[in-house]
Amino acid sequence: GGLNTRFVAFLGSLAFVLVFVIIPSFISFSATLEHSQRKRINDLYNLVVERQVNESTTSNRTTIITEAIDLIQKKPILGYGLHSFGTSHLFQSNFGAHNTFLKIIGEAGIIALIIYFLYFFTMITQGLC
């Protein structure tokens, strides 16, 4: 029916954007990257595609996430305020949350995270119907 037709149209649009926008942009962008940035992209590729997990691919994320969760547990309702979960004095690692969901809940609390999910869910369902 109508949903199936829209989904096929969505996939066609997604394929078009991928082939004619994202891939050429990435190729153009990757030509300007420094060696360390290319290494990071290669490490991410190895993590996602080849399932290789090591210190290089995780970039201390376990420590960062643990630190963020510890902070969130202290102020779960209202958080620490805007821009406090970026690179800040709150984190011993000085890297910030490095995760959108942890950043939202850490800066604005659980209510803001719920609103974010509701907004995101609404956009997806409205786009598919």
Image (tube, helix red, strand yellow):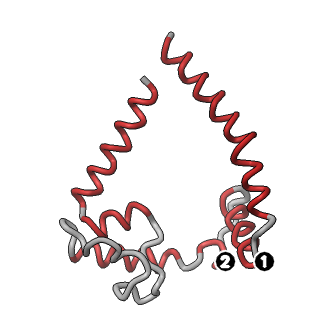
Secondary element at tag 2 = helix
Q: How many marks?
A: 2
Q: Quadrant of residue 79?
A: bottom left
Q: Between residues 19 and 2, which one lies in front from this camera angle?
A: 19
30 sits left or right of 115 in the view: right
128 sits left or right of 60 in the view: left
- Residue drawn 58% across the image and 28% down it: 10
Q: Outermost residue toward the top? A: 1
For discs 2 and 1, the disc positioned in front in the rendered view: 1
120 in relation to 70, above or below: above
121 in relation to 25, above or below: above
Image coords of residue 51 (percent x, y):
68, 60
Location of mark 1 (residue): 35
Image coords of residue 78 (percent x, y):
19, 67
Image coords of residue 88 (percent x, y):
39, 84
What amino acid type should be assigned to the residue bearing mark 1? Answer: His
The image quadrant where one finds the C terminus is top left
- Residue drawn 48% across the image and 81% down it: 95
74 in relation to 23, above or below: below
- Residue drawn 49% across the image and 13% down it: 2
First in sequence: mark 2 vs mark 1:
1
Q: Between residues 53 and 11, which one lies in front from this camera angle?
A: 11
Location of mark 2 (residue): 56
Q: Quadrant of residue 34?
A: bottom right
Q: Between residues 117 and 61, which one lies in front from this camera angle?
A: 117
Secondary element at tag 1 = helix
For marks 2 and 1, give the CA distance.
14 Å
45 sits left or right of 6 in the view: right
What amino acid type should be assigned to the residue bearing mark 2? Answer: Ser
- Asked if the residue at tag 1 contacts the one at tag 2, i.e. Cβ–Cβ closer than 8 Å, the answer is no
